[in-house]
Image (spheres, rainbow, N blue to C red):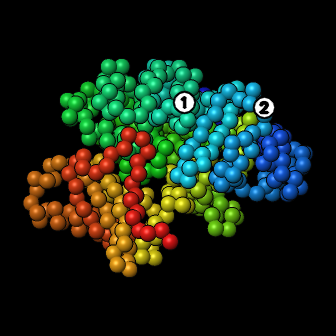
Amino acid sequence: MDIRYWNKDVETADVQKIRHLQLQRLKSIIASALKTPFYSRRLPSVGINSPDDIKTLDDLRRIPFTMKDDLRQNYPKGLLSVDTSEVVRIHTSSGTTGIPTVIYLSAKDLDAATDIMARSITATGAGRTDILQNMMSYGLFTGGLCMHYGAERVGLMVIPAAGGNTKRQVSLMNDFRTTVLHITPSYLLHIHSKLAEYGVKVGDLALKKAFIGAEPHSEGTRRKIEELFKIDAYNSYGLSEMNGPGVAFECVYKNDLHLWEDAYIVEIINPKTGQLVPDGQEGEVVLTNLIRHAMPLMRYRTRDLAFLHIEPCKCGRTHRRLSRILGRSDDMLIINGVNMFPSQIEEVVMKIPEVGNNYQICVEKDGALDRLIVKVELYSKMFLGEAKQIDNLKSKIGEELKASITIKPAIELHEPGSLPAFEGKAVRVVDTRPKL
Ligand SMILES: [Zn+2]
């Protein structure tokens, strides 16, 4: 295994040392937070008037959670701790309700975020000789620029391709011998389904790795990507509120994602009660950013559901590992009273060998009841099969889904390329039920 470190002292520091560093940095963040309109009201209301009121890391839990709505209600400057002359960059995320959320970075904040990104890239074994094609969108979204700066810092050659224009993407990969992709998993699968049309074979390309992220995906999807492209696919996790893609990243062992604990304090809570859950148990990820002072953010509820591994990783890093995102607490589907996550459906369908590179989940009203329809694309050769074979496959997919989600959905099989494709974040669920 090619184990490389960007900052070995910090990445392999013992737990005591990491906790000590977290406490020092938390106090410093509190000092910045008290300069913002938002936290200067909120922190004194729980008896925190200065950094000295934080004695141990447990004191963090005196601070109420910060919700996405807090960011919206305090848009645009309620969480800004410095004069805008100190800010060198902003990012926003649009969200579906219309009011965006914004983050502000000072030069020092940006430097720290870039360093964490560089650490993440290095953990996968990528380095100076690699050529990164960055296919996340550049601009207000954090995914493109933050990866770009991190990769340049490590010394990779960066192709700032951004999203879209699949044919040009494939030409760039071919012409510049791209070795690493940064891309959403759904778009990477879409690209595979277009290669034949462009007369390109996987073997013609020089790909070795992909950093996949920006949308939750299953282990089945990762395996499919690895097999189709003959590459290693590394899961990455981040969110714009926490500076983007480098919050947690897989190392060469690909056994879930090291969450960089010197930069972020992670808590896993029960989303209903807000209480911490025991180690190893699934819950909502709550993050405190320790490296951004222009816009402090503490105990931010991400809505992402995951768990923490407590056992050490073979790479020698001591930072705990976050599981892949198992779902979002706000995208749970309730179908005729049964709770499920779209990720459970993906996990099943992407493991079925006949299923191609795309799928869609539809929910509609059928009289008083809900109707769940899972539409999957097949590899083209399947359509040459007999009707009976098709029926058998439908019933196989239906039974395997029932074993996972307890209800049997209607299954529709589609030709390759016939379901909506996405060049960025995929929208997999189409729920046409009237909203209550
Ligand atoms: Zn590791």
Q: Which numbered dot is residue 427?
A: none
Tell whether 432 sits left or right of 18: left
Give me the residue at 50% from left, 31% from top: 138
Tag 1 or tag 2, which sits nearer the N-term?
2
Visible residue check, residue 129: yes
Give me the residue at 20% from left, 34% from top: 197
Residue 121, how many percent across, how many down?
53, 31
Residue 369, how many percent across, how many down?
37, 78
Kindly state the secondary structure of the residue where label 1 is placed. helix
Give the residue pinned by disc 2. 83
Q: Residues within 10 Å of mark 1 (few under 14, many from 20)?
A: many
Q: In which quarter of the image is residue 296?
A: top right
Tell whether 123 sits left or right of 288: left
Give me the residue at 24% from left, 62% from top: 412
371 w.r.t. 89: above or below? below
Kindly state the secondary structure of the residue where label 2 is placed. loop
Residue 114, how many percent across, how many down?
62, 29
Give the residue pinned by disc 1. 145
Marks counted in the figure total 2
Tell whether 88 sits left or right of 408: right
Give me the residue at 24% from left, 46% from top: 417
Spatial CA distance of label 2 from label 1 is 23 Å
Out of 301 and 317, give the one closest to the viewer.
Answer: 301
Out of 312 and 267, give the one closest to the viewer.
Answer: 267
Q: Quadrant of residue 172?
A: top left
297 w.r.t. 113: above or below? below
323 w.r.t. 2: above or below? below
Tell whether 34 sits left or right of 151: right
Q: Is mark 1 within 8 Å of ligand 1?
A: no
Label 2 is placed on what type of residue? Answer: Asp
Visible residue check, residue 123: no
Label 1 is placed on what type of residue? Answer: Leu
